[in-house]
């Protein structure tokens, strides 16, 4: 839990800035975008020039959160502005590997860096780290930060923060959806959020190609350890056959957990760069953050991820043996 003093300290630091960047991890998810939009809104109330910078495009699913005010894509010309920046806020990660394009720039400039995050893996150098592994979402922390300091949250910022919380809790279904989460959600609803509209944007806006791919993946599930562990895979061939795009391939791992016998599972996806994306999920029987760390990744006990250099078959063998070795 972050203390009121720490939250105030973050605000005090940022109040001295004229130009700031708000950044988040590569391949930003809903919580990353929500937190980024929330922080940008808060900072703009006292920082003259606030730019949200992303290292990868915003997926179509989350575009509605930034449609009126899209973030700036990282580029050489953005990088050239670095010397004019007074401070940086990093949201939803504290892992240098997830900020790879900018880490070198930050190291070279000695800028104040404030981090808001809820992950266990944290190796980034920062002036102030606000890390709360009990927070269901970084967006939750940002909402609390604003509310604790009586910073106004308008409807757009409230929608973004609500969507971020919803995304990281699987629409308030996962074990992290606690009292604190519902309380903040209610306070965001008081600020004009209409949950059903966000639900439709996030979960009822899929392309048929996504469902086709999900169907093929579920059809090909492999079960181990008496049905308790499941491994799903998505090959380049499956992606092409279904006509799926990157935006169709987020959060596909969640559905494997709908199977009653399955208590831990992995989804392996062949990526265009030749690596394998590993999504790890558990119903509490394995600390998946620990498993992900053995692959150089990270995350939460029940949801973590990593990248693997090698073939899908090699990834599968290693993932399975490391999950079984980490069974609690
Ligand atoms: Mn998050």
Image: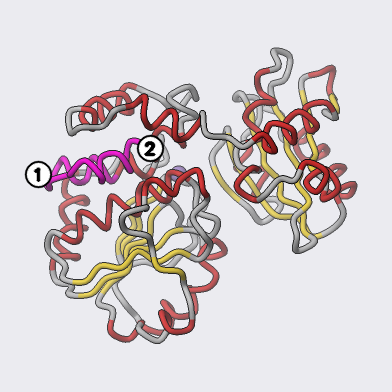
User: For residue 155, which quarter of the picture?
Assistant: top left
Q: Which mark is residue 163?
A: 2
Residue furthest right in the image: 313
Give how far across and how far down residue 211 sits, in percent: 68, 31
In the displayed structure, would residue 324 be above or below residue 152? above
Q: Residue furthest left?
A: 150
Highlighted range, magenta:
142-162
Query: Is disc 2 surrounded by few (<14), some (14 to 19) or many (20+) residues within 10 Å?
Result: many
* In-front residue for pair 78/5: 78
Q: Residue at x 78, y 41 (%)?
A: 242
- In the image, taking residue 56 as reference, residue 242 lies left or right, namely right
Pick the quarter of the image with the C terminus: top right
Q: Residues within 10 Å of mark 1 (few under 14, many from 20)?
A: few
Q: Position of residue 17 (x, y in %)?
A: 18, 72
Identity of the residue drawn at 16% across and 71% down: 48
Quadrant of the image for the N terminus?
top left
The Cα–Cα distance between marks 1 and 2, rounded to whole angstroms, is 21 Å
Q: Earlier in the sequence, mark 1 or mark 2?
A: 1
* Residue where numbered disc 1 is placed: 150
Whether residue 233 sits left or right of residue 183 in the image: it is right
User: Can see residue 290?
Assistant: no
Mark 2 falls on what kind of element? Answer: helix
Secondary structure of the magenta portion, mostly?
A: helix
């Amino acid at each position: 839990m972050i203390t009121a003093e720490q939250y105030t300290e973050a605000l005090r630091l940022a109040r001295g800035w004229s130009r700031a960047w708000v950044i988040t991890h590569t391949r930003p998810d809903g919580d990353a975008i929500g937190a980024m939009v929330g922080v940008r809104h808060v900072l703009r109330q006292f920082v003259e020039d606030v730019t949200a910078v992303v290292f990868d495009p915003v997926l179509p699913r989350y575009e509605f959160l930034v449609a009126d005010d899209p973030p700036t894509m990282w580029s050489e010309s953005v990088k050239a502005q670095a010397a004019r920046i007074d401070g940086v806020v990093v949201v939803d990660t504290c892992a240098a590997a997830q900020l790879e394009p900018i880490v070198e720039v930050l190291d070279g400039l000695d800028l104040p860096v404030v981090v808001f995050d809820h992950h266990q893996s944290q190796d980034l150098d920062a002036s102030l780290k606000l890390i709360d592994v009990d927070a269901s979402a970084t967006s939750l922390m940002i909402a609390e930060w604003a509310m604790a300091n009586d910073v106004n949250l308008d409807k757009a910022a409230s929608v973004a923060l609500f969507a971020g919380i919803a995304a990281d809790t699987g629409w308030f279904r996962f074990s992290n959806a606690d009292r604190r989460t519902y309380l903040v959600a209610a306070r965001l609803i008081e600020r004009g959020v209409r949950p059903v509209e966000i639900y439709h944007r996030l979960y009822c806006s899929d392309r048929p190609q996504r469902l086709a791919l999900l169907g093929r993946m579920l059809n090909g599930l492999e079960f181990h350890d008496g049905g308790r562990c499941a491994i799903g895979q998505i090959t380049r061939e499956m992606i092409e056959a279904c006509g799926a795009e990157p935006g169709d391939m987020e959060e596909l791992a969640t559905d494997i957990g709908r199977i009653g016998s399955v208590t831990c599972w992995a989804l392996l996806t062949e990526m265009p760069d030749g690596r394998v994306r590993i999504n790890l999920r558990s119903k509490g029987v394995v600390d998946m953050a620990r498993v992900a760390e053995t692959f150089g990744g990270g995350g939460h006990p029940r949801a973590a991820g990593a990248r693997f250099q090698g073939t899908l078959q090699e990834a599968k063998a290693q993932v399975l043996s490391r999950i079984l070795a980490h069974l609690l």
